[in-house]
Image (tube, rainbow, N blue to C red):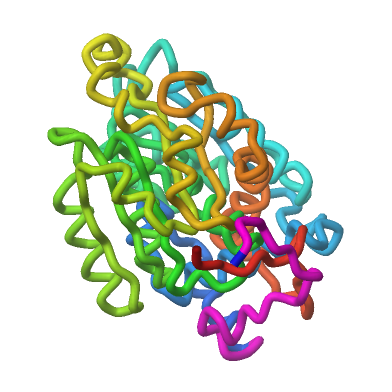
Amino acid sequence: MENKTIVMNPPTIPRAATLGIQSDTAFTELAKGLSGRDLVSIADLSVAEMAAILELAHAVKAAPEDFRHGLDAKQMVMFFEKASLRTRLTFEVAMNTCGGNALFVDQTASPLGERESIPDVARNLERWMNIIVLRTYSHDTIVEMAANSRVPVINALSDLEHPCQAIADFMTLEERFGSLEGLRFTYVGDGNNVCHSLMLAGALLGVHCTIATPKGFQPKLEIVHKAIEIAEQTGGSIALTADPNKAAEGADAIYTDVCTSMGQEHEASKRAPIFKPFQVNEDLMSRAQPSAVFLHCLPAHRGAEVTDAVLDGPQSVVFDQAENRMHAQKAITLMLLGGAKRIPSVRNKGGLQPRTKK
């Protein structure tokens, strides 16, 4: 086969057949089951619930006008202990374009729980707000808020997981490849919060995930074990390696993240030489399939974990990912606040690219 990407005409994505949602009634029941729930971890979702959220994300992207009043008069509050571009703006736009209102509280100078206990904060918020979005350092902060709040809580990033990012990422891959069942997905870099959510989401979707990290920077074992447990039920798989070149062989998608996350800046000089062999460059991408795509959650450190040639190259879908954060988070919010509905036809944006073999 020639070393080129083949683009087909944009078909309708057969989501019911591909992802196991059998009927409108089944979708409605899944939406009812998610209403009022929290999204603290990807592992909070069943296979069918993940499928329903992804279906809705494609629907709100294809026909945003159909959801313009889905969150009328609903109030969202966002408490962020970390700086944000994509997460904050995409949540605000998602809420506002569905008729709701989003309020932002800057917690970068004072972590949640410092001035007032988290249970007390939760008991106040639930009387004013319909949904709470948290971007924190400690995952325990989100767990505690969810345990004490009667309104849904969304994890918009913690030190353990980044579930909204992973949902947007696999939405992006569905746009490219259609069904993700059997997709060969490679993550190269730090076994961090993004890596954790990608493993769990990939497992739910029947993806074959290979995680390449330096020794000492592997993902947490409890997350690996949970992902393996899920993958055994879906036909997916989880593999760990310290060899990025081996991991990239035959991949349909290669993903990386920064080597030094927020809060780890003091480790940057120590980490740089360790992660240098794990840089995603043209040589590494050449080991993947001709139709492979490159993903990054952004912001990227150009010249560190990824080169300009890859980040700005024809295989990069990083800005599609960024756009899809808005659609994915709109779908999540609609689901948790009872505003979800199924629309009869969902078409993908740019046409499916078949997965190929060298």
Q: Is residue 152 in view?
A: no
Q: Is residue 301 in view?
A: yes
At horizontal 51% and vertical 26% (from top left) the residue drawn is 307
Count of residue discs: 0
Compared across the picture, whether 282 is left or right of 172 comes to left
Label the magenta part by its dominant secondary structure. Answer: loop
**Occupied quadrant, residue 122:** top left
At horizontal 50% and vertical 40% (from top left) the residue drawn is 133
In the foreground, 240 or 152: 240
* Place of residue 92 in the rendered image (x, y in percent of width and height, measured from the top left): 67, 36
At horizontal 75% and vertical 76% (from top left) the residue drawn is 12
**Occupied quadrant, residue 172:** bottom right
Magenta-tinted stretch: 2-24
Q: Is residue 271 above or below residue 225?
A: above
Compared across the picture, whether 221 is left or right of 307 comes to left
* Place of residue 13 in the rendered image (x, y in percent of width and height, measured from the top left): 69, 75
Q: Which image quarter is the N terminus in? A: bottom right
At horizontal 67% and vertical 45% (from top left) the residue drawn is 320
In the foreground, 259 or 284: 284
**Occupied quadrant, residue 203:** bottom left
* Place of residue 206 in the rendered image (x, y in percent of width and height, measured from the top left): 40, 72
Residue extending farthest front: 2
In the foreground, 244 or 45: 244
